[in-house]
Image: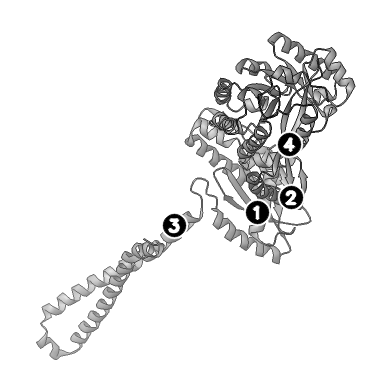
Amino acid sequence: MTRQQHQDRQYAPKDRTAAIFNALCLASAVLALAIGACLGFDHVERIVPGVWLLGAQAINLVLILLCARRLATRPSRRGAGERAQSVASRDPLTGFLHRNSLTEEGAAMFARAHRRSQAVAMLVLDLDRFKAINDLHGHAIGDALIRTVAQEVAQALPQMALAGRLGVDEFACAFAFDPREPAIVERIAERIVTRLAQPFEMEGHVLHISCSLGIARSDFDCPSIDALLRTADIAMHQAQKAGKNRFAWFDPAMERALQVRSALESGLRVAIPREEIAPYFEQQVDLASGRLHGFEVLARWEHPTHGMIPPDRFIPVAEDAGLIGDLSLSIMRQAFHAARDWDPGLSLSVNISPVQLRDAWLAQKIIKVLTETGFPAHRLEVEITESALFDNLALAQSIVGSLKNQGVRLALDDFGTGYSSLAHLRALPFDRIKIDKSFILSLSQSADSAAIVNTILRLGESLNLPITAEGVEDAAIEERLRAIGCAKAQGWLYGKPLSIAGARRLLAERRLILQPGPRLEGGDATSQLQAG
């Protein structure tokens, strides 16, 4: 059934009622005229007996009463219609306007403010941690919290302000102000942020939330209420990225950054299947012997028009856009294919994003790539950062267990930067610890860094876990690491990361590319390795 047919069916009874009412009114009027005419002529009395006239008069009286009752109820029904329209335009939980109603009334406010040389401030706020509270305590408490938040927001707003509910825990407010006094807007925003940072008590539970709030003003490149709402929303997301529990004014630079990010995301969706994002290989060296023992696989975007795009620009975008899984598997596939005929003593280390560890099928996907490329599982080392284990340790244990069963090794990356390193070392069967490069880079200048590195090395010895130092950039640091017992190192001292072709040239020079025919034993091949 179409929407128009539904409306026709909905209003058909009302139309029939109106038609009957109109017919009754017409009948009562005609009957009244007829009775009057009969009473006005004496000779009609002989034709129409008086009893009939009395009956007609009674019927007419009934018709008049029905018409009068109908007329008396029409205003109340009109009021009911107005109330229904009001309910349709407002959120039943908070009484705030729905988005469409906020936009319509905001447009009228926008026009009035322009005529009066005023500006309109738009505040968009999103509650921090509301979803966790709603999931933990249930929707009843969540709804009660939303109602209380709406009351707090309404009390902080000036008179004649508009307040709307845009989503489950997202609100928008608009009001006119003197453009020469933006501090008024900031005071209101600060009041809202402060009030919502206070604890709320709901049915015996003390709930802690905060809000991220974005502000935009109509006199700064906002030609319409829709544009004002959009720019305030951009500012709100910037407040979230800055740490939440704060407000931020919209700045055009935010929109430009958003456009750049959108362009990167669009480019990634094309570049990943085209394998424009390629693996690069950073050498890993045994400090005791000076021999090359493997590579860490890094991602580099070789853009056809913009050149090389560094990973710190596109990796966060890939994670936010849900593309990191496809990107990681593509890098693995290319790296494994390239390394199939490398010396079997060389390993590859691959970083796993925290986002990937939320995928219950990650282990199966990695094993599938290993099978498809023919790369031995025992030559792969998966690196996991401490932060990746915070969200769901049980799922991480399941993924790691499946990989370990296939012979894949496991390394704890960026060790020393997390909050519960020892607990993680006990929870997962790690084969290696990697010291974060921030400690290595400052090893010679910072006594604290030196103490941390020494402590990690002693811990590795007690747990029988080899240690790899990241970020080795000069020979003095290398020598110091060797002296205090560090097993392996990587960094620019041994060369910048190499492309597939560059890595192949390096290995060919060192005779670490397998020739067709019988495969070399790992010990025979690795005996030819040299440092750097």
Which amino acid type corresponds to the residue marked 4 in the rendered image? Ile
Residue 227 is drawn in which quadrant?
bottom right
Q: CA distance from mark 2 to mark 4?
A: 17 Å
Where disc 1 sits, the SS reads: helix
Residue 444 seen in this snapshot: no
Please give the residue where the numbered disc 1 appears in the rendered image. Answer: 230
Please give the residue where the numbered disc 3 appears in the rendered image. Answer: 84
Which amino acid type corresponds to the residue marked 2 in the rendered image? Pro
Q: CA distance from mark 3 to mark 1?
A: 29 Å
Q: Which mark is residue 500?
A: 4
Q: Which mark is residue 304?
A: 2
Of callouts 2 and 4, the N-terminal one: 2
Which mark is in front, 2 or 4?
4
Which amino acid type corresponds to the residue marked 3 in the rendered image? Ala
Q: CA distance from mark 3 to mark 2?
A: 58 Å
Where disc 4 sits, the SS reads: helix
Q: CA distance from mark 2 to mark 1?
A: 33 Å
Q: Position of residue 193 (x, y in %)?
A: 67, 40
Q: Residue at x 67, y 44 (%)?
A: 237
Crowd rating for badge 4 (residues with CA inside 10 Å; few <14, some 14–19, many 20+)? some
CB under 8 Å between discs 2 and 4: no
Q: CA distance from mark 1 to mark 4?
A: 44 Å
Residue closer to the observer: 82 or 106 = 106
Where disc 2 sits, the SS reads: loop
